[in-house]
Image (cartoon, grey):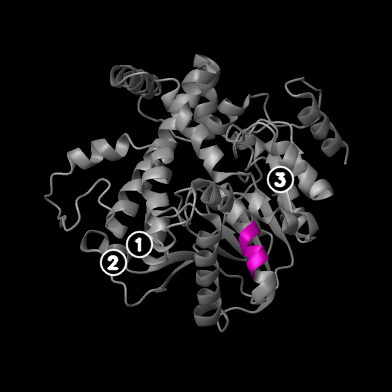
Amino acid sequence: MILRFACLLLLLLGSVALADDYGYPQLDGFAATVIGTPTELQPDLSVPGRPFRILGLDPFPDRPAPNYVWYHDKLRYLLLPQKRPAPLIFLIAGTGSSYHGPSMRTVSAAFFLAGFHVVVLPSPTSLPFMVAASTTQVPGVLDDDSRDLYRVMTMAWEEQLDERLEVTGFHLAGFSLGAAQAAFISKLDEDQEVFDFGRVLMINPPVSLYSSALILDGFLRDNVASGREFMAFWDEVTEALSEEFAATRGSVQLGPDWLYRVYGKRRPDDQRLAMLIGLAFAFTAQNLVTMADVLTESAYIVPVGLKADITAYVNPYFVVSARTPFELYFRELMVPYYRRTDPAVTEDELKHRASLYSIEDYLRTTERVGVTHNADDVIMADGELDWLADVFGERATIWPRGGHGGNLAFRDNVEYMLAFFGASLPEGR
């Protein structure tokens, strides 16, 4: 409660620095987002053996995958089963991520070690989900994407998991975009009552997908004025990596510890760190816009009817997609797609449906949904954290720092996340 009160003051006072006993390193939001959590500040989340299973679903059996992505004929998801009766938790990955991304590895290991059956689902904005499980194949509208996720979860339980697992109850959590979708899924389930989730935790959710995406677009757009400047930045990054690689005689082990050491030695400014974050998002957006265009035959990038094969020359399409930020994806691909079936739909309506504002009444009244966030999260627009604190009240925990998910593996955060579900790690972890 003391930490929550201090964090609320931080939100109300803006950039005023307050003393706290939170043990995460004194990094600003950009540095924390890039670096993550040093190993010595993490609990032991190593999982012995290979207890996981990768299972596949076919939500649309009559919709074959295109030849060039034939390997996504089914939606794969990750199962970590216990050998005894246990609660089951569904975890939803963040933007563009699969079930095996770094964030999901951290969260899934924590819940498995705490005694849960764990099911990890890829994001609806990932290529596998877009091909195999998305109804629209133009992800970005939260209510539609969440219905797709709920359909997949229901299929997984009824067709594959019900007879395989002894389940004592159901829970749900998501990270980043997956956290916002978890809220929508919780609302769906209160109507359809397939799972009757006990608890639902949102970890670092965007309030508005549109506003957060524009912020991420801006990290490159506002700091790189030309292709020449971008190439200079890229050369700077690769030169730094080469120097660090040479300094360690080729024994670089990529991860938070190495990034933390390099950061301490080089001290890149926020502009450089923002450019790195923006570059990572640009790659995600590029995959998103290209596949949405091809799968819906919208002809925004790739002409309708063009058949790709392994020898196809794709450079022109790569260049166009690389220059298409999320804002253009929204206006020139997503909006026209939705207007094919509803000519009256407006941009503002779709932006609203792509935000937590659209389910504010539900979030204010439900007792089972909670949120954890960071006061310096770099994807949040002005006023959005205040809105979350107001809507969730005592169900919100805002940490004083950590960037966007940089403190996800920090011991205090892992302990809080598990305690929200009435669980904890085994002693000694």
Q: Residue lying at the far bottom in this picture: please name it.
A: 163
The x and y percentages for residue 390 are 79, 43
Region rendered in magenta: 183-188
Residue depicted at 79% across the width and 24% down the height:
13
* Quarter of the rendering containing residue 56: bottom left
Q: In the rendering, at what x and y percent does residue 154 appear?
A: 55, 75
- Disc 1 is placed on an element classified as helix
| Residue 428 in sight from this viewpoint | no
As drawn, the label of residue 131 is: 1
Name which residue type carries label 1: Val
Disc 3 is placed on an element classified as strand
Q: Which residue is mark 2?
A: 65
- At horizontal 54% and vertical 55% (from top left) the residue drawn is 142
For discs 1 and 3, the disc positioned in front in the rendered view:
1
Task: State the CA–CA distance, disc 1 to disc 3.
Answer: 31 Å
Q: Nearer the viewer, residue 343 or 64?
A: 343
Identity, as a three-letter code, of the amino acid under mark 2: Ala
Q: Residue 417, position in %: x, y?
A: 71, 51
Crowding at mark 1 (Cα within 10 Å: few <14, some 14-19, many 20+): many
- Is disc 2 in contact with disc 1, using a CB cutoff of under 8 Å? yes
Q: Which three-letter amino acid code belongs to the residue tagged 3?
A: Thr
Mark 2 lies on a secondary structure that is loop
